[in-house]
Image (cartoon, rainbow, N blue to C red):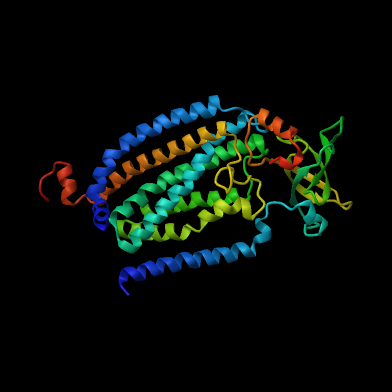
Amino acid sequence: MTPRRRRMLTIGLLIAGMALATGLILQAFEQNLMYFYSPADIAAGKAPPDRDFRIGGMVVEGSVQRDPQSLAVTFELTDYQHQTTVQYTGILPDLFREGQGIVAHGRLDAAGQFKAREVLAKHDENYMPPEVAASLKKAPPGVRP
Amino acid sequence: MFKTLHKYASPMHFHALARRWSTPLLWLSAVLFAAGLAGGLVMAPADYQQGESFRIIYVHVPSAWLSMFAYMVMAGAGAVSLIWRVKLMDALARAAAPLGASFTALALATGSLWGKPMWGTWWVWDARLTSELLLLFLYLGYMALQSAIDDRRAAARAGAVLAVVGVVNIPIIHYSVEWWSTLHQPATITRLGAPAMATSMLIPLLLMALAFQLLFFALLFIRARSELLEFEQRSLWVRELLGQGSPR
């Protein structure tokens, strides 16, 4: 084997080894790398009961109830399989609206409701002018992106 | 073909090539910047969800792409240099590092400015943001290593090993939004199927991406030239170029 071949092999093995090691590490930390749990995870009991975690999902249309006296707000969060009720007191991000994806940080109370300390809006990867979005809304649900 | 490759891999020829191309590339990039910015900031419509705020995409996405592309250049040059011992590649890798670091910092900064109004936070530790921050540290580590080792050959080899090892981070950055649940949304353009973006918004973004790409190559050539002159300061062609006489 020529020295050049040997160096090529060394570098190939180096990259393969690093990729394997990283893959195993990421596999081991799978749960920690998840930024949020879904309502289905909570229904399945995967979420930690006694410490803070994040929950992500869509705000159910028509479920947002604001307290007229304070900044308190209650809404339903869904992943289209299960729902979780979220309570939050504070200022919501601009993108927060019904049908929008959000991520809330807090913990479950005894009644199974999620007490959020922080609510972040998640936006999707679609970009289009308002007119296009409006005409897509009019189309039957089946062809919506 | 191998002969031509060999010719352009010689520091002297690459120096001449880079000198010829850096200025035209800069001009072309400036024209594309003007077109892309006019298209993105003035002509493109506002987004249906994010309104005018989405326009930061025209800086954020190209710099994020370039942050990864520059790393591939650095790691690729490092691997070629380790295997075939090409001096030119050491110069290219050294030249690419600060450029990549700048694009990474720009992507992180514009992402943060975008995150505050849209997500409601400057920063979160999700997989995409964290792996991009790791990329910045890889660049900074490479640059620190280069200045820590006095012997240029040794510095180039150590840096090349670091760059090649760090290359595993690139697919992690790209696929982080698919493998794990993240606050960052999935890819709009670099995905299978049509881009999830209206054409009137997409064209300026592609123009900006090309402008950033050409700017990167122009700056890479300029930086690589000065690296080569320093690497090769004792060689005949540099002395001739500088109009100096025979070796003292």
**Residue B132 left/right relative to A65:** left
**Which percent across, then down, holds residue B23?**
31, 35
Q: Position of residue B44 (x, y in %)?
A: 56, 28
Q: Is residue A141 above or below residue B72?
A: above
Q: Name the residue located 44 percent from the left edge and 51 percent from the top edge.
A: B71
Q: Residue at x 40, y 41 (%)?
A: B216
Above or below, B219 relative to B4: above
The quadrant the N terminus of chain B occupies is bottom left
User: Which residue is nearer to you in this view: B150 or B136?
Assistant: B136
Please tell me whether residue A115 is drawn above or below residue B25 in the rendered image: below
Q: Residue at x 43, y 57 (%)?
A: B163
Quarter residue A76 falls in: top right
* Residue pictured at 35% horizontal, 71% vertical: A6
Front residue (pair B241, B26): B26
In the picture, measured across the screen, residue B191 lies left or right of residue B121, that is left
Residue farthest to the right?
A111
* Residue B2 seen in the current view: yes
Please indicate, yes or no, whether residue A119 appears anywhere in the rendered image. Answer: no
Q: How many marks?
A: 0
Q: Position of residue B136 (x, y in %)?
A: 49, 49
**Image side of residue A142 versus residue B98, left or right:** right
Q: Given the current orientation, which residue lies at the most extreme top position? A: B42
Considering depth in this image, is A132 or B186 the residue closer to the camera? A132
Name, please, the residue furthest toward the bottom: A1
Give the percent coordinates (x, y) of residue A112: 86, 52
Occupied quadrant, residue B99 = top left
